Image (cartoon, rainbow, N blue to C red):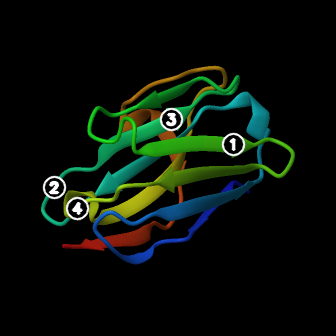
């Protein structure tokens, strides 16, 4: 079955960096866009970044220039390098697989499998 498992969250001071990883299994990884979303307490889940099946990247304006999404097709993994972290980046971060092959969307409803989430806390 499809599984997504995130790791790499933690507590970091403002200005610091973290790298999140998402290990996937159970489907043809190279056919699907993978995305990262985040959800802060009391807020809706929001799109952070996505990388398509052919490696095109998309970023939310709030993280552009600070975050980098990448994928390792040989090992079915996706990564989120987060630099210059700010307290407003504090949230639970989720990786997700898009529902349809060869498709890109920002909408959480179009992602059918999600990881368990990993907490990122940025202190000021």
Q: Which residue is mark 3?
A: 50
**Of callouts 3 and 4, which one flags the residue occurring earlier in the amino acid sequence?**
4
In what element is the residue under mark 3? Answer: strand
What is the crowding at mark 1: few (fewer than 14 residues within 10 Å), some, or many (at least 20)?
many
Q: Which residue is mark 1?
A: 71
Tag in front: 2 or 3: 3
Q: Which mark is residue 40?
A: 4
**Of callouts 4 and 1, which one flags the residue occurring earlier in the amino acid sequence?**
4
Q: Which mark is residue 20?
A: none
* Position of the N terminus by quadrant: bottom right
Q: Are marks 3 and 4 in contact (CB under 8 Å)?
A: no
CA–CA distance in space, label 3 to label 4:
19 Å
Instruction: Say left or right for 110 vs 89.
Output: right
Q: Which mark is residue 43?
A: 2
Q: Are marks 2 and 4 in contact (CB under 8 Å)?
A: yes
Instruction: Say left or right for 59 vs 42.
Output: right
Residue 34 pos. (x, y %): 58, 39
Residue with the most extreme left position: 42
* Position of the C terminus by quadrant: bottom left
Instruction: Say left or right for 104 vs 63.
Output: right
CA–CA distance in space, label 2 to label 3:
20 Å
Residue 46 pos. (x, y %): 29, 44
In what element is the residue under mark 1? Answer: strand
């Amino acid at each position: 079955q499809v599984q997504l498992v995130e790791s790499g969250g933690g507590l970091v001071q403002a200005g610091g960096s973290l790298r999140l990883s998402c290990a996937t299994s159970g489907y043809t990884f190279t056919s699907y866009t993978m995305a990262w979303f985040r959800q802060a307490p009391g807020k809706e889940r929001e799109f952070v970044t996505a990388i398509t099946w052919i490696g095109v990247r998309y970023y939310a304006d709030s993280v552009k220039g600070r975050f980098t999404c990448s994928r390792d097709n040989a090992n079915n993994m996706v990564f989120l390098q987060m630099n210059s972290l700010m307290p407003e980046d504090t949230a639970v971060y989720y990786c997700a697989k898009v529902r349809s092959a060869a498709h890109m969307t920002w909408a959480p409803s179009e992602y059918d499998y999600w990881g368990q989430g990993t907490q990122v806390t940025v202190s000021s």
